[in-house]
Amino acid sequence: MRCIKHFLIASLAMWANYLRLVGDGVHARELRSRALVSDNAIRSRLGALRRWRYVVVEPDHVVRLTAAGRRARAVWEPPRYVPIVGYRLFAEVVPPAEPVSPEPGGQLDLSVLLARALLGLTLEFERGSKLSLPVCANGLRVLGEDATRVRDLPRLSGVSKEGVAMLVGFLARTQLAAVEPDPAASRGKAVSLTARGLAAKRAAGRRLAEVEEGWRQRFGGEAIDGLRDILDGIRDARGGDAPLLSHGLAPYPGGWRGRRPYLTQTQAALRDPRAALPRYLMVLHRGGFPDGS
């Protein structure tokens, strides 16, 4: 992990979904096909990767790793991860132009298997919803008819202030929420759900229940309950005086998670991951920074 401090923006999500696929060089069109995303998405990701100097795009449109990109490969290989959300915070998967040979399950680590299960659930939820699962799980969930201070939302949702700004902005633009000056303070903003937002919150709860019931019928209630029990056990396990999960959340020396303004949120996650972590991993188009880490 000693090299991670050099890659503040190359999150595991960015590596797993894009940088990993570059290899020794790949045409931009082939990279888009391998990543299963749209033309707009690959242009956005390549633009970011070029700005951060992890790749170069040659005149013949072949994408190659730079020295920094190769160092990132040494740090992050071999994990895979959850998708990076796009416009309106929806997950995106574009079917490949040609059939892709499936990877043997025994060669995939746990993070890949869990990420694919989460992606499957997400895509099914979002096919029957006008709102994305991250918006519902991290935004609508913590808001109500009464005003909530915007500055309190990172603590309530588990999402960074950058992610909160995107959520609140989206909810306001779509008239699901109203943003007004904080009535209890001389500065700052407060947000509350409109009647439309409250209806959307109820609809999201019904939609998620429908999807879970469909999974129980498809895979069997015993399998679903067993997976939930295992994940609850991982979340609630303790090592010494601290939650075992917090061992993996401790920031490395010099890392940005140990500095303001993220330090307070990091400390809350170390004390009680169950309460402080978001209900859904919301990895933004910013390359995963900061919620992809």
Image (cartoon, grey):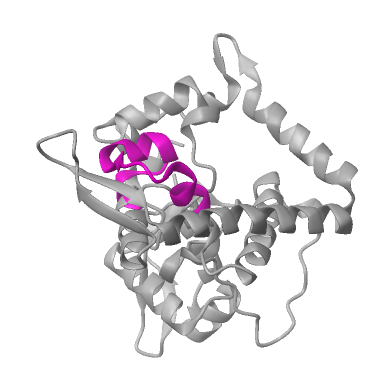
Vertical comparison of 65 with 214: above or below: below
Q: Is residue 184 left or right of residue 108?
A: left
Q: Position of residue 132 (x, y in %)?
A: 52, 62
The answer to whether residue 113 is seen in the rendering is: yes
- Magenta stretch encompasses residue 148: yes
Can you name the residue that lies furthest to the front here? 195
Q: Is residue 211 left or right of residue 188?
A: right
Vertical comparison of 209 with 185: above or below: below
Q: Residue at x 75, y 53 (%)?
A: 212
Image quadrant assignment for residue 60: bottom left
Which of the two residues, 237 or 100, is positioned nearer the viewer here? 237
Image quadrant assignment for residue 254: top left
Q: Residue at x 77, y 33 (%)?
A: 229
Q: Which residues are magenta?
A: 136-164
Q: Residue at x 62, y 16 (%)?
A: 238
Q: Position of residue 187 (x, y in %)?
A: 11, 39
The answer to whether residue 292 is seen in the rendering is: no
Q: Residue at x 30, y 62 (%)?
A: 52
Image quadrant assignment for residue 214: bottom right
Can you name the residue that lies furthest to the bottom here? 60
Q: Position of residue 97 (x, y in %)?
A: 65, 87
Q: Is residue 247 left or right of residue 263?
A: right
Image quarter (top left, top right, bottom left or bottom right) of the C terminus: top left
Vertical comparison of 76 with 67: above or below: above
Q: Is residue 124 left or right of residue 272?
A: right
Which of the two residues, 232 or 101, is positioned nearer the viewer here? 232
Q: Position of residue 268 (x, y in %)?
A: 41, 25
- Magenta stretch encompasses residue 142: yes
